[in-house]
Image (spheres, rainbow, N blue to C red):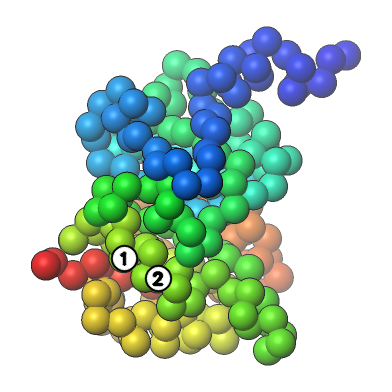
Amino acid sequence: MAKIVDTPEFKARQEKFLIKVEPDKVLDFTQLFQNSHPVLLEIGSGKGEFISEYSLLHPEWNFIGFELQQKRVEITLRKLDLEKHHNVKLATFMIDEKIEAIIPPASVEGVFIQHPDPWPKRKHFKRRLLQQKFLEALSRIIRPGGFIQVSTDHDEYARWIWKEFSKRQDFTSKLTDTISEKPLLDDHVVTYYEREQRRLGFEPKHMLFEKKQI
């Protein structure tokens, strides 16, 4: 039996949904989606539960999912429907503070970052994604009034993330309690990772920050 990655249907999904991202070459959203709808990014798409389900609930938005691991991108592709997911693109690409080299300034409506690697050992803290250089880059690509939503089940990392955002003048928390143990979206999508971590006794923490108006 042929592997799913070799089937004509899977190849059609690759052609429709996968985009090639080149360092220092800015993406053209209008060309990618053939419309001018607001664009949201998911950084670290995992197995694709969020982007495949949430994009169907919001056809008025366009979504780009970035994921470094090729196997996870292939799993996500299997969840996308050629007829229904007209507003989704995927890229096998590592995102860091260089994101502003591929995303136009003030062009993004929102960014979802779900369960980034906490790098729990102190000697590895420098590898954490959510640090000042990265937040500075996100500030440049997100339009005023846009947002960043972050979820993590690692308590110490949640506090770290909050402290990093609290140092900035360009973002403000949209939550009264700053860190919420309840999902922030009425149409919250439970990912495989969230479900497995809950089974192990780790509850996710959610944060929502708005880019201040100029």
Q: Which mark is residue 76?
A: none
State the image coordinates of residue 134 (x, y, percent, origin top left): 45, 69
Numbered disc total: 2
Drawn side of residue 107 relative to residue 90, left or right = left
Kindly identify the residue that appears in the image at 39 percent across and 64 percent down: 137
User: What's under tag 2, amino acid-wise?
Assistant: Leu
Classify 10 Å Cα crowding around label 2: few (below 14), some (14-19), many (20 and above): some
In this rendering, the answer to whether 138 lies above or below 159 is above
Q: Which mark is residue 135?
A: 2
In this rendering, the answer to whether 42 lies above or below 152 is above
Outermost front residue: 24
In this rendering, the answer to whether 49 lies above or below 190 is above
Kindly identify the residue that appears in the image at 63 percent across and 58 percent down: 193
Does any portion of residue 96 appear in the rendered image? yes
Classify 10 Å Cα crowding around label 1: few (below 14), some (14-19), many (20 and above): many
User: What's under tag 1, amino acid-wise?
Assistant: Ser
Q: Are marks 2 and 1 in contact (CB under 8 Å)?
A: yes
State which quarter of the image contains the N terminus: top right
Does any portion of residue 79 appear in the rendered image? no
Q: Which mark is residue 139?
A: 1
